Amino acid sequence: MTLSAERLAALDAFIIDLNRASAEVILPLFRADHGLEDKGAGKNLPRDSHAAFDPVTEADRGAEAAIRTLISEHFPEHGVIGEEYGDDRPDAEFVWVLDPIDGTRAFISGLPLWTTLIGLRHQGRPVLGSIGQPYMDEVFIGHAGGSRLLSRGHSRPLKVRDCATLTDAVIATTDADACFDGAERGAWLQVRAAAKLARLGCDAYAYAMVAMGTMDMVIEAGLKSWDIEAAIPLIQGAGGMVTDWRGQPVGQNGGQIVISGDRRPLEEALVSLRRSAK
């Protein structure tokens, strides 16, 4: 079934409601007693492994529960894939892909760089996505019709910026030491050496900055579907692109990804990244 413009508009309005519902759960717990647990405890992982300390809070679980409740009330036929509560009808025509708090480490540190990621698949393809940062009153929303930022009662269109070469690019990754293996880290260091500026620790907020046109590229590895699917329609709607480290479309399982506003620095970065592509 084709996704009509009218139906997409209704789902676009609904994703705003989902962001509002999650924010009502999360904000009272930010910089407060958030009920921290470590999902990595007892797994005997190396201390330098990204998953060795795997925090989750009451805010993560409560926000995803609130989002799932609204979806079941308004669209009971839709499926859901979420980081905290798993899969429910992942083969449905419409499937919501949720990360209630991307950047839990930032959240528990009191840094407002965490986001709520809400994506929607139609017939297996990401068609709508939002990156919400409620503490700063920002919701970035995108689909094939375009991307926009909702903030403080105003809406503004989003567009990636031109960037002629990698040497002009502002790039980002979350944590090169913890998230990349040896070969991946080497590839990242090659790209970083060529770029104008690199920023670390921004999690998915960096994706939104590419859509806004303040950054040029984000390079990540080891991502799950809920870490990236919300960003794909947002970046594409703003004129950018999301690929794997071979330059191919990103599959439903995440993995190694590159987000870029301009194809020219992306092609330069892929020269290094392809050598470590999986």
Image (cartoon, helix red, strand yellow):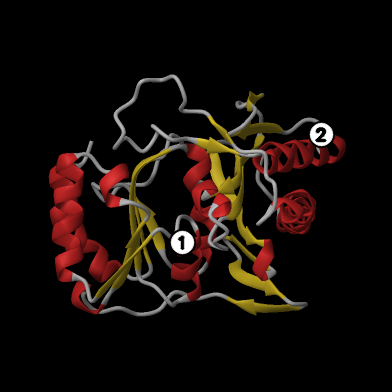
Q: Nearer the viewer, mark 1 or mark 2?
A: 1
**Depth order, front residue of 169/48:** 48
Figure quadrant of residue 73: top right
Q: Secondary structure at mark 2?
A: helix
Q: Is residue 196 rendered to the left or right of residue 102?
A: left
Three-letter code, disc 1: Tyr
Give the residue drawn at x 16%, y 41%. 182
Against 237, is 158 above or below?
below
Residue furthest toward the right? 73
Instruction: Give the labeled residue for mark 1.
Output: 207
- Amino acid type for the residue under numbered disc 2: Ser
Q: Is residue 112 visible?
A: yes
Residue 2 figure quarter: top right
Q: Residue at x 50, y 69 (%)?
A: 238
Label 2: how many residues lie within 10 Å, few (<14), some (14-19) or many (20+)? few
Q: Which mark is residue 239?
A: none
Badge 1 or badge 2: first in the primary sequence:
2
Q: Give the class, few, some or many, for how many residues have Cα within 10 Å of label 1's Cα (few <14, many ≥20).
A: many
Q: Position of residue 11 (x, y in %)?
A: 74, 52
For the view shown, which residue lies furthest in the front direction?
33
Point out residue 71 in the picture as x, y percentages from the top left corner. 78, 39
Q: Can residue 239 be seen here?
A: no
Query: In which quadrant of the rendered image does the N terminus lie?
Result: top right
Residue 112 percent across, percent down from the top left: 57, 63
In the image, what residue occupies the spot 77% across and 30% down?
A: 77
Q: CA distance from mark 1 to mark 2?
A: 28 Å
Find residue 72 and name its label.
2
Query: Do callouts 1 and 2 mark residues in contact (Cβ within 8 Å)?
Result: no
